[in-house]
Amino acid sequence: MDGNKDESERCISLAKKYLAEGEKSKALKFLNKAERLYPSPKAKELMDQISTMNGTTPGGKKTHSEESTKENVRQRKGSMGRTASEEKQGESDTVDRSYTQDQIDAVKRVKKCKDYYDILGVQKDAAENDLKKAYRKLALQMHPDKNKAPGATEAFKAIGNAFAVLSDTEKRRKYDLYGPETDTTTDSRRGHHDYTHGFEGDISPEELFNMFFGGGFPTNHVYTTHRQRHTHQHHQHTRASNVSNDGSYTLLLQLTPIILLVLLSLLSSFFVSDPLFNMHKTEKYSVQRKTGNLQVPYYVKRDFRVEFKSDLRRLERQVEEEYISSLRQNCWRERSYKENMLWRARNYADGKLYEKASNLETPSCDQLNKIYSS
């Protein structure tokens, strides 16, 4: 209904423009459309004004314009009995050129969804790559700088939050276990659409979009999550309490935990011994050694000494585990970077970027494959 009201206002503005230019027939056409979409006193006053301007002929006969006005009034009274096809045609003629009917339908679909999997259009057992593909497609479609349809901003927030939750293993587990926790009755009574459904990601939709597309659209929109509002209110409350409790004794009590933490950290430094090895060469760890199994280099102190062979094997196993864990993390970063570059190249039809991405090396992944194949 709000969309019809906006379109009605736009038609009234166009009618005023044509009336000022002397195009009375065009003005009446748009006023009739405004009345069909959302009847208002403003449109009726303009129609009466046009009828008064037309007047009657000297012979007492009504002019063609006045007859047309009365015919339009009769059509307006019987507009409720129009067929479904006429209604659809009337609405499609007045859709704002800045967005399409497909964009409006897409926004409505997202806002009707109460489940994150439905929002992204994926199955509940969807893998991470499926989530990424669905997010890329919907985020480009719903970004407010591209989609000007009413409600596109809320839909864009819902898509970003859905991906942020489902891509996090722990949040996804809790979401699958408990489901949405939104009080829809209260939200609908207030007229507020809660796109978080009781679960919220740790990153804003705009920041997530920039991570995927490298800032493909200008950041003209500001997004505030419920957690950010709660944090802001908490900071305000803390500042107010500090002002009311100013005093040397209160300040000393506030500083006591910090002083205790500093003392504990100093005491712990005396009792904690240095690790036996380091993966990188430093002044303290300057002697290089290699593990017996994978020949992984590591560094120890000059006074390094192992009493038993079993201790040495345990130490080298720890070195290799740390080395393989580091390779896995680096391999994941290399593959993600390469996949994102390939996707951008395909999306923007950039041949040079695609060639560069295809030739991009992943040394950590190659080293992992070499270890597992040996």
Image (cartoon, rainbow, N blue to C red):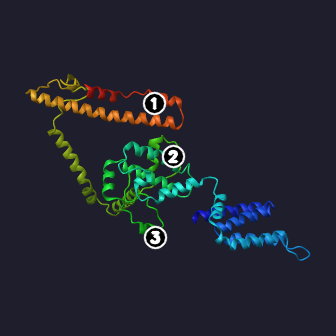
Residue at image mark 3: 189
Callout 2 touching callout 3 (CB < 8 Å): no
- Compared to residue 168, the image places residue 234 above or below, namely below
The quadrant in which residue 30 appears is bottom right
Residue drawn at point x = 53 percent, y = 30 percent: 351
> Quick check: 314 left or right of 348?
left
Q: Amino acid at mark 2?
A: Leu
User: Which numbered disc, 1 or 2, marks the residue that appears first in the sequence?
Assistant: 2
Q: Position of residue 253 (x, y in %)?
A: 24, 57
Q: Is residue 16 left or right of residue 200?
A: right
Considering the numbered disc 3 on the image, is that residue within a helix, a strand or a loop? helix
Local secondary structure at mark 1? helix
| Residue 186 screen position, x and y as percent | 42, 69
CA gap between label 3 and label 1 equals: 51 Å
Q: Is residue 121 above or below residue 233?
A: above
Can residue 81 be seen here? The reply is yes
Mark 2 neighbour density, 10 Å: few (under 14) some (14–19) many (20 or more): some
* Disc 1 residue crowd, few under 14, some 14–19, many 20+, Cα 10 Å: some
Residue at 46%, 34% (x, y): give it. 342
Q: Local crowd at mark 3 within 10 Å, few (<14), some, or many (≥20)?
A: few
Q: Where's the N terminus, which quadrant?
A: bottom right
Q: Residue furthest right?
A: 59
Location of mark 1 (residue): 357
Secondary structure at badge 2 equals helix
The earlier-in-sequence mark between 2 and 3 is 2
Residue 234, given in percent of the width and then of the height, sits at 36, 59
Residue 140, labelled with which disc? 2
